[in-house]
Every structure is written in C-alpha cells, then in structure tokens.
Image: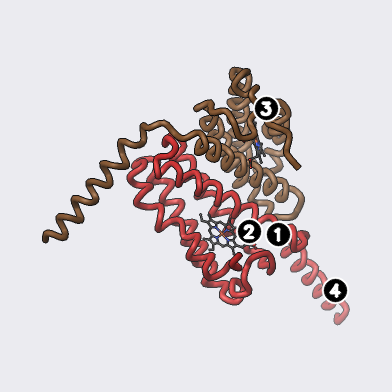
C-alpha cells in the first residue's frame, strides 16, 4: 500500500513536471529567453519609430493602421515573453520582485494598443494622435524595470 | 476666458499646420529609414518565430509572430513604392521594378496565408508553408547589397 502510494505520488510528480514543461520555455536556456524577449522589444521599437514618422507627416499614412495592428500583436508577444520569469538581460531585479505590478503594466499596454488599433481602423490619423501617447507606455515601464544604458 | 480662446486657437492652428503637410513629399533619408525599420521588424520576428519552433519560446506565440510577419510584409510592399534609391537596396530594385514588386506581392500574399493557416490550425498546420512564405533570402540575394562586416 505504501509503495503503491509512493508510485502514485511519483506519477503525480512526473505529471506536474510534464505539465510545467509542456506549455513553454522549460527547455530554453536563459540566453534564448532573453534574446527572444529582446527581439520582441526591437520589433516594438521599429514599429513605433515608423508610426512616429507617419504621425509627424514625414511619411504618407498608407500604413497607419498596419503599424497600430502590429503594435497591438507585439504587445501580446511581449506580455507572454516575460512569463518564463528568467532574470538577466537588461531586466532589472525589481521586475521580478514587483512582478504583479509589471504584469499589470503589460496588461494595460496590451489593452491600450488593442484599443488604438481598433480605433485607427475607423478614425484614422486624428484618433491615433489622440491614443498614441497613452497607449505607448514604453518609457514608463523602462524607467522602472529596464537597466539604463 | 481669453486664455481659453488663445489655447483653442492654438490647437486649431496646430491642426491646420499638420494636416495639409501630409501631402508633401518625403525626404529620401526618411523613406530609407522607414523601410529599414520594417525590414528590422521582419528580421526580429522571423528569429522569434523560429525560437517558438525550437522550444526556446512559448510555442503558442507562433501565430502571433506569423501575424506580425504578414503585417510587416504588407507594410514593406508599400514602403518601397516611392522608389527612393539608396540604403542597402541595389540599383536592380529600381531597374527591375516589375520583378521586385512581384516578389514583394508574393511575399505579402504568402505570409498572409501563413498567418491565416496558423490562426486556424496552429504551428503544426502552418509549418509546411513557412519555407514558401519566408522568401527573405531569395530577394536579398538579388536586391540587397551584401552585408558589410
């Protein structure tokens, strides 16, 4: 009976390990996870710069909606990319210590960029100009959670 | 009251300044920087897509990367249409414009199909279409200057 319980217990442990391994980055080493989230941040940077060039009328607005859509999806990617909670890169230790606050900021970033993308489709440039600053909360998060270069 | 009126007049003036300016021609350097940002997005997102297949990143994010690749490809299609020479674009881009823009159109259509397939059936369904959609190297070999080391 005891050994049966042990076996069952063992299975349970194996199941727990398997369950935590299957969804994602359990196999990734730290550098992979850091490279991955930095690639997402680089994409956010490039799309934000291009949106900025359109809003400041340096570039025609044909891709206006496309950039807002890309930003909304990139925000979702960014949100998921930190869930492996792998320290390092330019993420400050405060990020993991205040993880609930960090997550709240990511949730907010996802919601507001999604709203901007949805409104851009209907309202075009004036709406994007109004929603851009509150949606792109890059600096607010970086000031708290990213190591200054 | 006067202050409020002044403020309102200021806003109207700012709006008048920015809106008609949209039609002015873009500076060549801006056009080049703009399309490079789109290519940078493609570079970072293609790397991230691969990471999801190699167990280095959340597998369920495959679709989010495919979606951004499709959007960025549609942006790229527009970004080269001002036909501004320079950057790392070879003169062949403009000399063989019909072939170049055909390749861009196919790239946009195939990545859109990749994203749709991923939305419906996940990475497993979309993976066989990856090679046919991510025609980066085929285009770069003909139309981009070799990378300076």
Q: Which mark is on residue B14?
A: none
Residue, disc 2: A81
Q: Which mark is on residue A33?
A: 1
Element at label 4:
helix
**Lower sequence index among marks 1 and 2:** 1
| Residue A13 position in % (x across, y down) | 78, 71
Circle 4 packing at 10 Å, graded few (<14), some (14-19), many (20+), is few
**Lower sequence index among marks 4 and 1:** 4
Which of the pair A94/B36 is nearer the observer?
B36
Residue, disc 4: A7
Relative horizontal placement of residue B22, taking residue A24 as reference (left or right): left
Which of the pair A22/B26 is nearer the observer?
B26
Residue B135 appears in the picture as rendered: no
Check if mark 1's residue and mark 2's residue have beta carbons within 8 Å: yes
Distance CA(mark 3)–CA(mark 4): 62 Å
Distance CA(mark 1)–CA(mark 2): 8 Å
Check if mark 4's residue and mark 1's residue have beta carbons within 8 Å: no
């Amino acid at each position: 009976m005891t050994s049966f319980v042990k076996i069952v217990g063992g299975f349970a442990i194996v199941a727990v390990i398997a369950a935590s391994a299957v969804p994602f980055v359990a196999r990734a080493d730290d550098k992979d996870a850091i490279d991955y989230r930095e690639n997402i941040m680089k994409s956010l940077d490039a799309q934000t710069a291009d949106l900025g060039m359109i809003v400041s009328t340096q570039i025609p607005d044909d891709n206006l909606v496309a950039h807002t859509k890309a930003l909304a999806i990139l925000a979702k990617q960014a949100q998921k990319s930190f869930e492996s909670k792998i320290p390092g890169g330019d993420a400050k230790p405060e990020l993991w210590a205040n993880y609930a606050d960090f997550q709240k900021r990511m949730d907010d970033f996802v919601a507001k960029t999604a709203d901007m993308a949805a409104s851009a489709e209907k309202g075009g440039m004036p709406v994007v100009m109004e929603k851009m600053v509150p949606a792109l909360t890059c600096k607010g998060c970086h000031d708290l959670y990213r190591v200054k270069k | 009251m006067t202050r409020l009126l002044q403020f309102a007049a200021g806003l109207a003036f700012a709006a008048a300044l920015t809106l008609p300016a949209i039609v002015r021609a873009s500076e060549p350097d801006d056009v080049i920087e703009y399309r490079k940002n789109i290519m940078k997005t493609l570079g970072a997102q293609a790397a991230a897509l691969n990471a999801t297949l190699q167990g280095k990143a959340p597998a369920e994010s495959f679709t989010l990367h495919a979606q951004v690749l499709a959007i960025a490809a549609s942006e790229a299609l527009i970004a080269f249409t001002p036909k501004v020479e320079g950057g790392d674009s070879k003169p062949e881009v403009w000399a063989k414009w019909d072939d170049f823009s055909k390749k861009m159109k196919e790239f946009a259509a195939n990545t859109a199909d990749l994203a749709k397939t991923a939305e419906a059936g996940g990475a497993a369904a979309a993976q066989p279409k990856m090679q046919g959609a991510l025609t980066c190297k085929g285009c770069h070999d003909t139309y981009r200057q070799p990378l300076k080391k």
